[in-house]
Image (cartoon, rainbow, N blue to C red):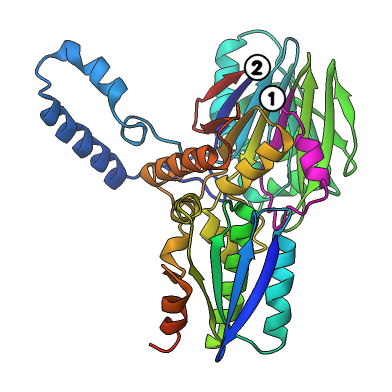
Amino acid sequence: MNITEAFQENVIIVSLDGRFDANTSDAVEQFLRVRISESKFQFVLDMANVPYISSAGLRVILAVVKELRRDNKGDLRIANLQKTVAKVFEISGLNNVLGIFKNPDSAIQSFTD
Amino acid sequence: MKVKFWGVRGSIATPLTNIELNDKIKKALELALKAGLNAPWQTPQFIEQLPWYIRKTAGGDTTCVEVETGDNRLIFDAGTGIRPLGLNLMRQEIGKPIEASILLSHTHWDHICGLPFFVPAYIPNNNITIYGTHSKIEDRIRHQQDFEYFPVPLDIMRGIKEFVQLREGESFRIGDIEIDTISLYHPGGCTGYKVSYNGKTIIYATDSEYKELSPEPKPIIDFFRDADLVIFDAQYTMLENIEKEDWGHSSTIIGIDMALKAGVKKLAFTHHEPTYSDEKLWDIFQKAQNYLELQSEKNDLQLYLAYEGLSISL
């Protein structure tokens, strides 16, 4: 899993490249939690290059979102889901509780709407 | 080995309500009208073709699973499901002493409250042994029947011949069955059991939360390794599992990931959330099937939604 980031005003766009599963979820969680500890609370997770997600990946997303939404600190929003991964979000019900956007720009825009 | 589910509900017994029953009848009649049903001989086939959640119910009794081998009968947990199991044994074994080993995962109410209604335990000729890893296992069961809570004390249940105090992680034998135990993550602790007999393996692992599956093989994955059947706590949906962190339960999706990782052959979801209707349980199960297809195109993992009366032969 390759993790890169870009900044747009207060929003951090975190791009993942690779399978998001038990082997990689710890790295993603650690990356996000370091940024949260630095008082960064608005994230867009660009998953254009994530072909696969398992329960371990879903758990990290939900746990981070839960923490960010506590006391209305911020949020993590999802962009660029591949078809199979989007299906997993739908099956798990995550699509009902997360902000999911077609591309990072619309996800970033949603923080100012 | 033959496995039979007598109680599949978690937390508290949940009988089907009249509203739920009426809803099933209404849906069945609407489908009958649509199918143009007009003769009694058509009904058995019509019923068979109804969706599972209309023609069946998961049931409302709390956890109890029976495993029969050639010579031994194991009973996992003594939730309210042990009551009908006991009545069935009394019918089957008329005049013959009943031998059974009750293995308790833990002593939360939904796993022990059926024991005072387990009729074979009252027959002195029977030979029932109760196993558990939790401290003072006999006292815990005894106090459930203190006079303040139940009119009949444990001493009257003369079919219960022995309590076996196990240690966490202990392996032991019952006849020619090998049994291993593992500690599970649940408030107050819970024990998972692995039953090995005649080249087949069954895991009973209810009431457990699996927060993470890290890259290193965790003990629980090794415990599940190559099992023929894993009976798995899937009380919550994935979402609820996160909301109810540390409540000590799991979901179908996590179970599938673990089973795939461990090379499990059959996976039965049980310990159903008491607020879930049959329709919701069926929906969760269909989604679990979809998830399995998406996660792995080539696998032989078979999924089961546990319901009262479900039998699986290995």
> Where is the C terminus of chain B found, in terms of image quarters?
top right
The residue closer to the viewer here, B50 or B308, is B50
Is residue A40 positioned above or below B248 on the image? below
Q: Nearer the viewer, residue B268 or B39?
A: B268
Asked if residue A72 lies left or right of residue A36, the reply is: left
Image marks 1 and 2: residues in contact by CB distance under 8 Å:
yes
Query: Which image quarter: residue B172?
Result: top right
Q: Of B97 and A58, which appears nearest the observer?
A: A58
Residue A20: in magenta span: no
Determine which residue is flagged by label 2.
Answer: B314
Q: Which mark is residue B228?
A: 1
Which region shows up in magenta?
A: B201-228
Height in image: B119 above or below A84? above
* Image location (x, y in percent) of residue A105: 45, 78
Mark linked to residue B201:
none
Dot 2 amino acid type? Leu
